[in-house]
Amino acid sequence: MPSAILNKYNENPQTEYDSPWKQILQLYFQDFMQFFFPQAHEEIDWSRGNEFLDKELQQVVRDAVLGRRLADKLVKVYRTGGEESWIMVHIEVQSQEESNFAERMFVYNYRIFDLYKLPVASLAVLGDEQVNWRPNQFGYELFGCRVNFHFPVIKLVDYQQRQSELEVSRNPFATVVMAHLKAIETRENRIERKQQKLVLVRRLYEQGFAREDIINLFGFIDWMLSLPIELEQEFWQEIRNFEESKRMQYITSVERIGFQKGIEQSQNQIKQVLLKSISLGLKLKFGETDQNLLAEIEAIQDISVLETILEAIGTASTVSQLRQIYQLPATDT
């Protein structure tokens, strides 16, 4: 899986956290249940496997106004007594409270039952930072008629007080939780994020994970702990050195090509966004600008210079002042 490079021009906390959770949940569903819901895990006959019901979930949410759908999964399992059961797993990674969250959980649950006449267990994992926001029930009462829907909730922030447990656990979701928490903690400090990313990746080797698990979990860590391109390059160099010292080149041998493609794609996307913004800024500030100026700017490959030009448009009085930034001969307007 290629590295996912996010940046301040297209970074969206919802998108940033959604996709990796979906993928890792499907890869390690049994581990997910064992880590977060151990009692339910014991009641499932894992020897019969499990099945993700993507088409059924699409049917449930179709034509329903349920708000955002994030890392939702509907899974068929068999209990130890032999009966078929369905589990609705809802991963909510939004960064703020949502007033109708419990209602949405209720709607999912009753629509599944209504369509398929099967009981369903609704489980929620909340990745937000609000310690006191713990919606776990929905209900109402009218004229003696009562609806009372309860569902178990896991708050990832609770694991901030259980770091020692996470560090020694070999369950893949210990790594998942640590990566998620570090992504939140280092949101404003990318240098610290790089260090924490290195710690998490090294831990995969030190814990003795299999090669496939290391690559899968690295994909999650890499996506959650996105870095600016310069720090990402430093990160890769340190990982290469580390793998060489361990004589286990798992990540660099498999992921390097994808990473390079990701860097090139990301740089190009950033440049295109900057150029569009610069072109619009020049038009608003100076009116119709000569094509030579735009051609000069489009030829610039250094993204930091383009950023500086964009910022300078607001304060520059003339085009020649902008040209001084990239040190080309000035031709005043």
Image (cartoon, helix red, strand yellow):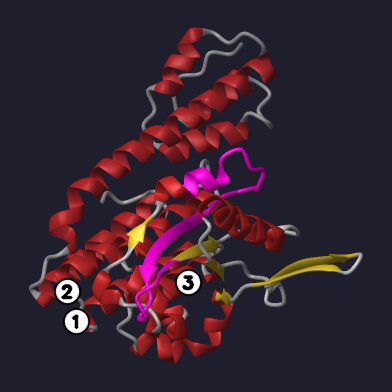
Q: Nearer the viewer, residue 193 or 49?
A: 49
Above or below 299: residue 253: below
Above or below 228: residue 30: below
Can residue 226 be seen from the camera position used here? no
What residue would you read off at disc 3? 182
22 left or right, relative to 234: right
Label 1 environment density (alpha carbons within 10 Å; few <14, some 14–19, many ≥20): few
Q: Amino acid at mark 2?
A: Ala
Q: CA distance from mark 2 to mark 1?
A: 6 Å
Q: Which mark is residue 230?
A: none
Residue at the location (57% across, 58% down)? 113
Quadrant hosting residue 303: top left
Residue at the location (46% across, 79% down)? 36
Considering only order in the chain, which callout, 2 or 3, is on the residue closer to the N terminus? Answer: 3
Q: Position of residue 162 (x, y in %)?
A: 49, 89
115 left or right, relative to 220: right
Label 2: which secondary element: loop
Q: Amino acid at mark 3?
A: Lys
Q: Please say if the residues under marks 3 and 1 sit with CB atoms less than 8 Å apart.
A: no
Q: Which residues are magenta?
A: 57-85
What residue would you read off at disc 1? 208
Q: Nearer the viewer, residue 230 or 327?
A: 230
What residue would you read off at disc 2? 210
Q: Nearer the viewer, residue 23 or 176?
A: 23
79 part of magenta stretch? yes
Q: CA distance from mark 3 to mark 1?
A: 22 Å
Above or below 45: residue 70: above
Camera-nearest label, 3 or 1: 1
Q: CA distance from mark 3 to mark 2?
A: 23 Å
Q: Amino acid at mark 1?
A: Gly
